[in-house]
Image: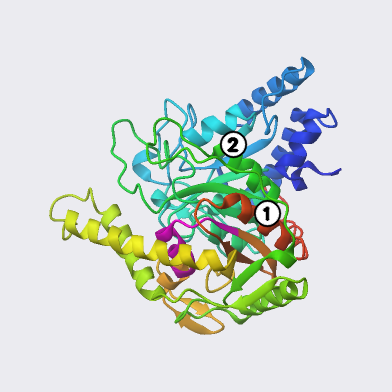
Amino acid sequence: MFTDPTTASAGELAAAIRAHTVSAVEVLDAYLAQIDRWNPTLNAIVTLDADGARRRAVAADVALAHGVWWGPLHGVPVTLKDGHSTAGLRTTAGYPPLADYIPAQDGTVAARLRAAGAVLLGKTNVPPLLLDIQTDNALFGRTNNPWNPARTPGGSSGGAAAALAAGMTALDVGSDFAGSIRIPAHFCGLFGLKPTEGRVPLTGHIADLPGAPVAPRLLWSIGPLARSVADLDLALRVLAGPDGRDTDVPPVPVEDPPLLALRDLRIAWTPGLPGLPVAAAIQAALHDLATRLAGAGARVAATLPAADLAAQGRLRTDLAKLLLTAFDPPGARPAPTLAAYFTALHARDAAITAWEAFFTAWDVLLCPVTLVTAFPHAPPGSAVLVDGSAAPGWQLLAHCALFNLTGQPVVVIPVGVDPAGLPIGIQIVARRWGEARLLAIAAAISAVVEPLGRPPPPPPNPLR
């Protein structure tokens, strides 16, 4: 049993509230105190609805007193990345034209969290329109990493990751176009899940304005950031499946995670994708983990598909540009063509086929999330230092964006820290629609890894 609600997993909190070991109001008070302590330093939660959260927590306790259980997140405090529409609560996507936008209805993510019993605390910071690897915008300013406030928590789910790592929320839901769940999880020492593309509806994502067409229908995935693999599984079950509005989501059920042993697994790994530099500490962490898994009886090999992965990376960039520029004003840049779009989709099919064939021979692939651990705040697009050598900023996305192209599900788990004490996460990649087995494998792998613990405490709140 936990002694501090802000260190517990969402599943543990829900169980304790349901068992009347702790009340939803007591849990909320602990989280509000943690927000008061941490948020002035981190600037992670940018819209706080303390009054609404308290009304909801009181109602949760009253419901339980009358034998009514709302669902698997009953009374659990959660936040939402500020790219998910929330009825009656400001949703800006970090974009000045949306500074005062208050949706009339919840997006699917918010609606499903509320239906599962969650207590929505507020919204977490993002870069403008969720399109940066750091989290900073003209509306709310910069978010800092709880492990070292001079460094970025990543983006675009940087506010979500910072809030979760600091214990200001029990769960958040990010979105991922080129690593926006996975890079913040890696930088902040968390667990993150990018589900298969199409597993979770995009309805209400990026302040889904009434009547506005959705251009980037491909490459996005919505998924949770959490403090355990079990919470990733819990959240996926709450969020996944058709909603009747996002017609790209098929009715594929979320299966129960299987029971498995490490000795039965076939684990591929790589210290990095060809042609990309990766910090020695990250490579060493991957090598050490592969060695331990082999020692536990798994079949482990350093291998990758026989495919041109650099070409796949360029294809993802080209396809993203086609999607993101579809509604540019005439003359703003060369207009995308339908022929170019279908040519890119044809090449994407070949890339997906190559990876799916790879995952018939291997259960998962372990690989880096990005080139480095959390780097110092820098202007957008800046080069990054990898063990003292400069690498172009676009390369920071390469290890993640590859699996946005192919739609593979990916779990990030923390596996250690670098010499500066900054978290190291790794990607665990599996076949499409294979989240149940992927999560079971991630749980088995994380069980052989030493837990990171919490970031160091922040300086005293200057406002108190």
Nearer mark to the viewer, of 2 and 1: 1
Extreme residue in the left direction: 331
Badge 1 local density, few (<14 within 10 Å), some, or many (20+)? many
**Looking at the image, how many numbered discs can be counted on the residues?**
2
Question: In what quadrant of the picture does the C terminus appear?
Answer: top right
| Residue 116 appears anywhere in the view | yes
| Residue 440 numbered mark, or none | 1
- What's the image's color scheme? rainbow
| Residue 229 numbered mark, or none | none
| Relative to 155, 319 lies left or right | left
Circle 1 sits in a helix, a strand or a loop, which is it? helix
Badge 2 local density, few (<14 within 10 Å), some, or many (20+)? many
Residue 259 in picture, x, y percent from top left? 73, 52
Q: Which residues are magenta?
A: 398-411
Residue 110 in picture, x, y percent from top left? 52, 33
Q: Is residue 121 above or below residue 134?
A: above
Q: Which residue is mark 2?
A: 238
Question: How far is the residue under mark 2 from the one under mark 1?
Answer: 18 Å
Residue at the spot 43% in from the left edge and 46% down from the top edge: 94
